[in-house]
Image (cartoon, rainbow, N blue to C red):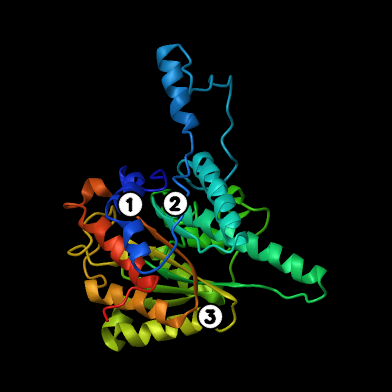
């Protein structure tokens, strides 16, 4: 999916990551890998446009309706109906994987897909809560999140300068934004702000800075990493995201890495994590034993150089799932 981003191409990210040897790398370190394939979502809007232009309806097209009504939301949320469908489908896939005791690894695609990933994780945990309650041992199961990103992703349609939903997924998970997205799975919010850690921040909108400070999430900028070192910051991030939670999800935007090492992404910002800092972060997650799900997003092969960023994505995923130097 690339409809949440400001430019096309990131929808081919999953193919680039697979081509870079994801399955082979994970099997080499002892994992059993099941590839559930892409979540395919028909772009009804484009199909309707094509139908109207040609005057015919092809086998994969839907006749355009007589009238359509835009969702009643303030501000701007580009491609909202399509992203809602994509995230709803992703939520269902992830929920099923968790229920089968699998480790969900989601590759993207733009960061708006995290709306579906997190919804699916929490939906599965709510089902587990219900099962525990039925056995007489009620317990609230909560999810901690480490969000590794150059950006805060805490915009809403009212605050976003662009209306691109890949800048909104964390806000949605906290219950802010269009109901069509916040209530995927039938409930909101999905996360408690105190269980969320932002790491690697270096490019924030003015209103987003205020949103981060007001939200209650924990935020570590590149300045913090420069001053304290990545290892110290990562230890604190893992502690903050796991101290009151039962599960740990990491949402890794490849634009958190410096563009010299990860040129193939749509929102490059100089001064990001170095190659080794990115690996150290993932290696520390593996060593913690706390990681229960992972997504890696925003690899754009069109902007890449010889699939350098796709290969880095595979290496980072492998580090998070147990690959070590010795």
Q: Nearer the viewer, mark 3 or mark 1?
A: 1
Q: Nearer the viewer, residue 234 or 271?
A: 234
**x, y percentage for residue 171?**
51, 61
Which numbered tag is attached to residue 247?
none
Callouts 2 and 1 close, C-beta under 8 Å: yes
CA separation in Å, label 3 and label 1: 30 Å
Circle 2 crowding by C-alpha within 10 Å: few under 14, some 14–19, many from 20: few
Point out which mark residue 18 bears: 1
Q: Residue at x 50, y 61 (%)?
A: 104
Give the residue at x 51% y 44%: 86
Q: Are marks 3 and 1 in contact (CB under 8 Å)?
A: no
Q: Dot 2 corresponds to which residue? A: 35
Question: What residue appears at the point 35 percent right and 88 percent down from the top-left corner?
Answer: 232
Decide: is 42 above or below 122: above
Residue at the spot 75% in from the left edge and 71% down from the top edge: 132
Q: Depth-wise, is mark 2 or mark 3 nearer the camera?
A: 2
Q: CA distance from mark 2 to mark 1?
A: 10 Å
Camera-side residue of 68 and 318: 318
Q: How many residues crowd mark 3 within 10 Å: few (<14), some (14–19), many (20+)?
A: many
User: Judging from the image, what secondary structure is the residue with disc 1 in?
Assistant: helix
| Numbered circles on residues, count | 3
On the picture, is 304 further left or further right than 198? left
**Which quadrant of the rendered structure holds the C terminus?**
bottom left
The residue that mark 3 highlights is: 242
């Amino acid at each position: 999916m690339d409809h949440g981003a400001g430019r096309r191409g990131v929808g081919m990210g999953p193919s680039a990551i697979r081509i870079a040897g994801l399955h082979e790398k994970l099997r080499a370190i002892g994992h059993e890998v099941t590839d559930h394939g892409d979540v395919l979502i028909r772009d009804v809007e484009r199909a309707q446009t094509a139908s109207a232009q040609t005057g015919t309806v092809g086998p994969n097209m839907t006749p355009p309706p007589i009238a359509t009504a835009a969702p009643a939301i303030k501000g701007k949320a580009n491609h909202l109906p399509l992203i809602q469908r994509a995230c709803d489908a992703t939520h269902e896939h992830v929920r099923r994987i968790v229920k089968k005791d699998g480790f969900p690894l989601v590759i993207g695609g733009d960061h708006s897909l995290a709306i579906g990933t997190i919804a699916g994780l929490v939906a599965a945990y709510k089902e587990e809560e219900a099962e525990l309650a039925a056995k007489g041992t009620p317990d609230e199961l909560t999810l901690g999140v480490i969000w590794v990103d150059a950006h805060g992703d805490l915009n809403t349609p009212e605050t976003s300068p662009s209306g691109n939903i890949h800048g909104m997924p964390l806000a949605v998970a906290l219950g802010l934004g269009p109901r069509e997205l916040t209530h995927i799975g039938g409930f909101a919010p999905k996360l408690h702000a105190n269980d969320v850690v932002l790491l690697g921040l270096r490019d924030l909108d003015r209103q987003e800075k205020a949103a981060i400070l007001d939200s209650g999430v924990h935020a570590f900028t590149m300045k913090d990493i420069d001053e304290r070192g990545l290892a110290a910051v990562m230890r604190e991030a893992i502690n903050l995201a796991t101290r009151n939670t039962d599960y740990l999800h990491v949402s890794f935007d490849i634009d958190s890495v410096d563009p010299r090492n990860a040129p193939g992404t749509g929102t490059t910002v100089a001064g990001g994590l170095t190659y080794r800092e990115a690996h150290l972060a993932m290696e520390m997650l593996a060593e913690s034993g706390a990681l229960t799900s992972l997504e890696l997003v925003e690899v754009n092969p069109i902007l890449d150089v010889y699939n350098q960023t796709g290969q880095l994505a595979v290496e980072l995923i492998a580090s998070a799932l147990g690959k070590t130097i010795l």
